[in-house]
Image (cartoon, helix red, strand yellow):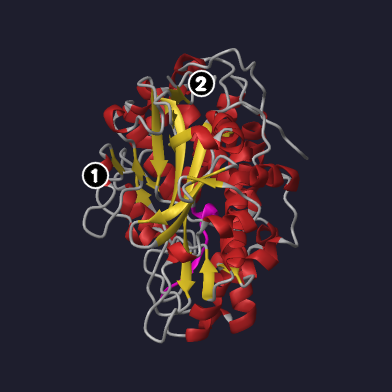
């Protein structure tokens, strides 16, 4: 089934008020994903810097054109070397969870093609979000962050602080799995700590701990949003899996939770408040290690709840909301898939590596079952180098790893290959400012002095604001 986002007239601007209406528009979503590239050695002592793999020549040989020293690509996204010699790919701005999932998966293809086109030796390219995973002994890890557009007024609601941490802590089905003292659900949770939500950009890290979410203040968010009435919520507690269905569902369910906050009047604030957790960061750590699915944490009302309990409450509210407003089609579809996944998770036995048909949908299930079949359920521990090694190979892009081979067997209905191909090439409807960036980089790069997410500066000192129909300027 191919689901296309609703097309609003390009000449009709979307404002934050539209998100509060009975037919809210698609949400703009963008993903940042760092990749671990284990470099080859240029001599017997020195590793090749990652920048040598990311040249204009390699990008061109991979079928893309780049502007501004490999920062922005002609598919609307960006690729660059992040602080600490990390390789990062940022998707173009996407409309809705289906486009976002396709763009995220396309990013993995793009990074792989560029590394291959460089012709340089390496020890593996990995898509990881684990905070303490060692790859070939180097100890390098990757970050993965999701960004969602919402009205600034919604971002300032106290319900953001109540609901988002509870959602993230309980969304264990969307995680990728990791080998520690035993198998656990999450790769990313072990670096999460402190306040669950930061509203300061310098709050990305406190010591070795990171918040679950960041909502940058208006004065620090111009590059991304470009309009004071909009805000961005950056989800930092999420794993970067390979399953197309999970990619889609992570974005869709997060967007649905934001819809609940935007339409609190239709659900009831008391009903929303009852789902908040007393200590969501601690809850995330507990749930991530609870393969028996029976550990409980306290709500702010003093009730004991499991991760499954919280997820079921979110689904109930999503169903209720969908009966009162006209949600985008891909989010409506996600509600029914959400029910299917949570029901299936509840009837499975993760502590026994038994997940039923969920192994055809969930990263965390597939990895666990394959590890158990290869090594035995009781051998999945970081004391066993074979378990650690195989789990890392699962996340490898080059040479092709186990996850890639696994998900090739289960084509996704939610993320059609045609849409992934469109995100690879930059072939997209002119609905977001990414389309403007694509057109200018492809057809007018000789006159461009610089590009960023919000504007293009030309050599004649003129400036083009990347104003789309979401009224970004």
* Mark 1 closeness class: few <14, some 14–19, many ≥20 residues within 10 Å: few
Q: Is residue 391 visible?
A: no
Is 21 in front, or is 148?
148
- Percent position of residue 97, x then y: 59, 38
Against 468, residue 295 (above or below) is below
- The residue lying furthest to the right in this view is 1
Looking at the rendered structure, the number of numbered marks drawn on it comes to 2
In the rendered structure, the answer to whether residue 103 lies left or right of residue 267 reads right
Q: Is residue 174 magenta?
A: yes
Residue at (44%, 62%) from the top-left corner? 51
Residue assigned mark 1: 202
In the rendered structure, the answer to whether residue 75 lies left or right of residue 405 reads left
Against 227, residue 105 (above or below) is below
Question: Circle 2 — which element?
Answer: loop
Find residue 470 and name its label: 2
Question: Circle 1 — which element?
Answer: helix
First of labels 1, 2 by sequence position: 1
Q: Is residue 133 visible?
A: yes
Against 135, residue 341 (above or below) is above
Start-end of magenta stretch: 172-180
In the rendered structure, the answer to whether residue 30 lies left or right of residue 439 reads left
The image quadrant where one finds the C terminus is: top left
């Amino acid at each position: 089934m191919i689901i296309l986002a609703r097309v609003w007239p390009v000449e009709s601007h979307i404002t934050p008020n539209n998100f509060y209406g009975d037919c809210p528009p698609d949400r703009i979503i963008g993903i940042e994903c760092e990749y671990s590239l284990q470099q080859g050695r240029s001599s017997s002592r020195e590793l090749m810097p990652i920048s040598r793999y990311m040249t204009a020549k390699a990008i061109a040989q991979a079928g893309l054109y780049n502007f501004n020293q490999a920062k922005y690509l002609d598919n609307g996204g960006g690729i660059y070397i992040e602080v600490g010699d990390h390789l990062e790919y940022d998707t173009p701005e996407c409309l809705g969870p289906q486009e976002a999932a396709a763009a995220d998966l396309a990013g993995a293809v793009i990074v792989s093609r560029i590394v291959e086109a460089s012709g340089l030796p390496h020890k593996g390219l990995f898509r990881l979000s684990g905070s303490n995973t060692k790859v070939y002994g180097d100890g390098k890890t990757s970050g993965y962050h999701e960004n969602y557009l919402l009205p600034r007024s919604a971002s300032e609601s106290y319900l953001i602080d109540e609901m988002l941490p509870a959602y993230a802590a309980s969304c264990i089905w969307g995680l990728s799995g990791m080998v520690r003292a035993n198998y656990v659900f999450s790769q990313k949770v072990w670096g999460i700590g402190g306040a669950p939500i930061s509203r300061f950009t310098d709050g990305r890290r406190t010591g070795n701990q990171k918040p679950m979410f960041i909502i940058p203040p208006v004065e620090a968010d111009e590059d991304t949003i470009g309009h004071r009435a909009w805000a961005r919520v950056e989800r930092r507690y999420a794993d970067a899996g390979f399953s197309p269905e999970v990619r889609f569902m992570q974005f869709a369910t997060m967007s649905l939770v934001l819809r609940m906050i935007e339409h609190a009047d239709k659900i009831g604030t008391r009903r929303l408040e009852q789902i908040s957790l007393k200590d969501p960061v601690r809850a995330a750590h507990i749930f991530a290690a609870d393969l028996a699915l029976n550990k409980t944490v306290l709500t702010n009302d003093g009730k004991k709840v499991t991760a499954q309990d919280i997820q079921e409450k979110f689904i109930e509210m999503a169903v209720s909301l969908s009966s009162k407003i006209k949600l985008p089609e891909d989010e409506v579809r996600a509600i029914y898939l959400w029910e299917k996944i949570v029901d299936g998770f509840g009837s499975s036995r993760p502590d026994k590596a038994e997940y039923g048909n969920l192994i055809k949908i969930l990263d965390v299930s597939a990895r666990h079952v394959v590890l158990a079949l290869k090594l035995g359920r009781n051998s999945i521990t970081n004391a066993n180098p074979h378990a650690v090694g195989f789990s890392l190979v699962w996340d490898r892009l080059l040479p092709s790893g186990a996850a890639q081979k696994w998900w090739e067997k289960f084509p996704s209905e939610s993320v059609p290959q045609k849409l992934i191909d469109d995100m690879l090439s930059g072939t997209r409807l002119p609905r977001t400012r990414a389309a403007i960036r694509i057109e200018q980089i492809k057809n007018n790069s000789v006159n461009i002095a610089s590009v960023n997410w919000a504007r293009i500066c030309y050599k004649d000192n003129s400036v083009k604001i990347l104003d789309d129909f979401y009224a970004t300027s």
